Image (cartoon, rainbow, N blue to C red):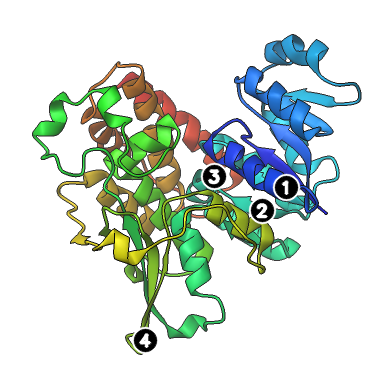
Amino acid sequence: MKKISILGSTGSIGTQTLDVAAMHPDSFEIDGLAAGSNTALLLEQVRRFRPRRVSVASKELADDIRPQLPAGVELFSGDEGLVQIAAGGDADYVVTAVMGSVGLRSTLAAIEAGRDIGLANKETLVTAGHLVTELARCKGVNLLPIDSEHSAIFQCLNGERAQDIASITLTASGGSFRDLTREQLRNVTVEDALRHPNWAMGAKITIDSATMVNKGLEVIEAHWLFGLPYEQIGVVLHPESIIHSFVEFRDSSIIAQLGNPDMRVPIQYALTYPQRWHSPAQRLSLAQAGQLTFREMDFARYPALRLAIECGKIGGTATTAFNAANEVAVARFLRRDIPFVRIEEILEEVLERHTAESHPSLEQIEDCDRAARTLAHSL
């Protein structure tokens, strides 16, 4: 029986992780759940899965739900609550599915406690990849990718030698606006941006898909997960989202991982690795798919992707500033404070004013995060 804690249990990845756990009740036990402000859904999850420990975003929310919790459930709140769910209790596996850099300290705490990590919070590696990967090595902890692209690369590399890798390529759907020109983007709405053609995801990641920031974050994450230089990491547009990513080896062979878009597949593989269990996901028929199409990445069309990769090559706090500015800019767009194309402009402006620190400490990373957010709010 694997005991699991989930950070971000009411989000898209968190709810699908619980779906997977429910399909295998004799194999998984839920030890802890951390949510944000969706207390109604959290309480449903608590009643169904009976975790021993629960956390919510604030003390006020904790006070609201306390009378509704079953006897014996420990209740926490805020950033410290995330750390308690990640590193306290009896879990031996932590799924980090919170959105944004808020997941960094709790992920580090889970690794420090010796827990294997199912990583769906890409911002953790984007903001502090050197700290996270080094601590995981020291503690002998597995970082198992949940993002579909990184899970695909992880599966393609099983049994292969690192020196045989020529390159890895992440596929990108292109998001909600993949067929629009730069000029057409000027008038798109929040509702337009949230209509992803292939995946059902949360609002923030759906906007990131439309700007291609999400793919930029994934390139940085892949750099840390697989230890490859940026020159060996590529991106290609693949509108069908059936090939989730692929690896080319030095003998020119290419191995790809395919499947219908369903996040429960990479989630389950991260939970059961190295085993593969039955999944209810719809089986892929290539005959029915008919054709798979690909396009070279246009960095002029997607300047945020170019900017993310440039930040990755600079390293240090450059990626921290990029991520923090993007989180603020996306939140402002979702509030209708700024138009869609202003997201990319804010990223450019914040990074123009940023001087990167190489090999930053956790404190320097957090200082950079705060400063970038303040600037992005003010622009």
Query: Could you say whether the residue bearing mark 1 is in a helix, strand or loop?
Result: helix
Q: Earlier in the sequence, mark 1 or mark 4?
A: 1
Per the rendering, the mark at residue 250 is: 4
How many angstroms separate mark 1 from mark 2 (CA)? 8 Å
Tell me the residue that label 2 is attached to. Answer: 117
Quarter of the figure with the C terminus: top left
- Which comes before the other along the chain, label 2 or label 4? 2
* Earlier-in-chain disc, 4 versus 3: 3
Which quadrant does the N terminus fall into?
A: bottom right
Classify 187 as above or below 276: above
Front position in the image: 28 or 277: 277
Going from the N terminus, do you reach mark 1 or mark 2 first? 1
Marks 1/4: CA distance? 37 Å
What's the residue type where badge 2 is placed?
A: Ile
Q: Residue at the spot x=77%, y=47% of the render?
A: 25
The CA distance from mark 1 to mark 3 is 13 Å
Q: Which mark, residue 121?
A: 3
Report if the CB atoms under discs 2 and 3 are less than 8 Å apart: no
Residue at image point 19% right, 26% down = 188
**Element at label 2:** strand
| Residue type, label 4 | Arg
Neighbours of disc 1 within 10 Å: few (<14), some (14-19), many (20+)? many
Label 4 to label 3: alpha-carbon separation:
31 Å
Q: Nearer the viewer, mark 1 or mark 4?
A: 4
Residue flagged by tag 1: what amino acid is it? Ala
Within 10 Å of disc 2 (Cα), the crowding (few <14, some 14-19, many 20+) is many
Mark 3 lies on a secondary structure that is loop
Give how far across and how far down residue 307 sits, in percent: 28, 48
